[in-house]
Image: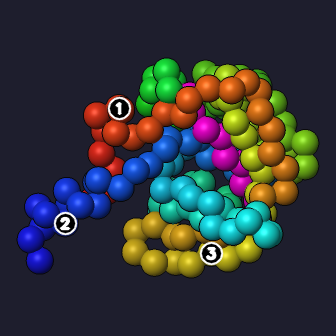
Amino acid sequence: MDLEAKKKVLRSFTYGLYILTAKNGEDYAAGTVNWVTQASFTPPLIALGVKRDSRLHELIQRTGKLALMTLAQDQKPIAQDFFKPTVREGNTLNGHPFEPSPTFGLPLLTELPYWLEAEVRHLYEGGDHSLVVAEVVEAGVHYEDKPLVMWDTGWFYGG
C-alpha cells in the first residue's frame, strides 16, 4: 500500500471536534475527540472512537456512560486544553466550568453549544482505539453555533 496515499485519503474524511467526558464517583476524565458519527435514528445511537490506553476509555468501560459536547467554530483553544490530562478544580475541568448532566451527573462544559448523554450499548476493542456504540438518552442546546471541524484547525488525527 502507498502509505502516503493512505494517510491523505484517511485525513480527507470530515470530522467535527468534541469534548468527551466520563466519571466514576469523584474520578473525572475529559478529552478532545473527533471520530464521532450518528449510527441509528431508532434508537438514537452514536458511534465514536476512544483511545484504548486513555482514562476516558477506562471510565467509559467501567460505568457504561458518557457525555459528548460539540465545540463551536471559535473554540479551538478549548479543544487544545483537553489534549492534556484532566485536572478538576471545584466545578472546572482543565480550567473550564462544568455542570452535572441531568441523567447521569456527568460533567457538561457550559461554554460549549451542544451536548448529549449516552449509555454504552457495545464496546468493540480494535486497534489502538475502541469503537463505542452508545444510545443517546438526553440532549440539550446551550446556544446555537457552527461546529468546529478538524479541517479548519490545520490539525490532523488519522492516517
| Dot 1 alpha-carbon crowd within 10 angstroms: few under 14, some 14 to 19, many 20 or more | few
Front position in the image: 74 or 31: 74
Look at 49% across and 21% down and name the residue there.
74
Look at 84% across and 50% down and name the residue there.
138
Real-space CA distance between mark 2 and mark 3, rounded to the nearest whole angstrom:
26 Å
Identify the amino acid type marked 2: Lys
Identify the residue under disc 2.
6
Q: Position of residue 13 (x, y in %)?
A: 35, 55
Q: Position of residue 110 (x, y in %)?
A: 73, 26
Could you say whether the residue bearing mark 2 is in a helix, strand or loop?
helix
Q: Report the mark closest to the observer, 1 or 3.
A: 1
Could you say whether the residue bearing mark 3 is in a helix, strand or loop?
strand
The quadrant the N terminus occupies is bottom left
Whether residue 70 is visible here, answered yes or no, is: yes
Q: Looking at the image, is 127 positioned above or below residue 77?
A: below
Q: Quadrant of residue 128?
A: bottom left
Give, as a single range, the part of the protein colored magenta: 61-72
Identify the residue under disc 1.
153
| Dot 2 alpha-carbon crowd within 10 angstroms: few under 14, some 14 to 19, many 20 or more | few
Q: Quadrant of residue 136?
A: bottom right
Q: Looking at the image, is 3 positioned above or below residue 34?
A: below
Could you say whether the residue bearing mark 1 is in a helix, strand or loop?
helix
Mark found first going from the N terminus, 1 or 3: 3
Classify residue 71 as left or right of residue 144: left
Mark found first going from the N terminus, 2 or 3: 2
Identify the amino acid type marked 1: Thr
Q: Looking at the image, is 112 positioned above or below residue 21?
A: above
Q: Which mark is residue 123?
A: 3
Front position in the image: 109 or 37: 37
Look at 56% across and 42% down and name the residue there.
18
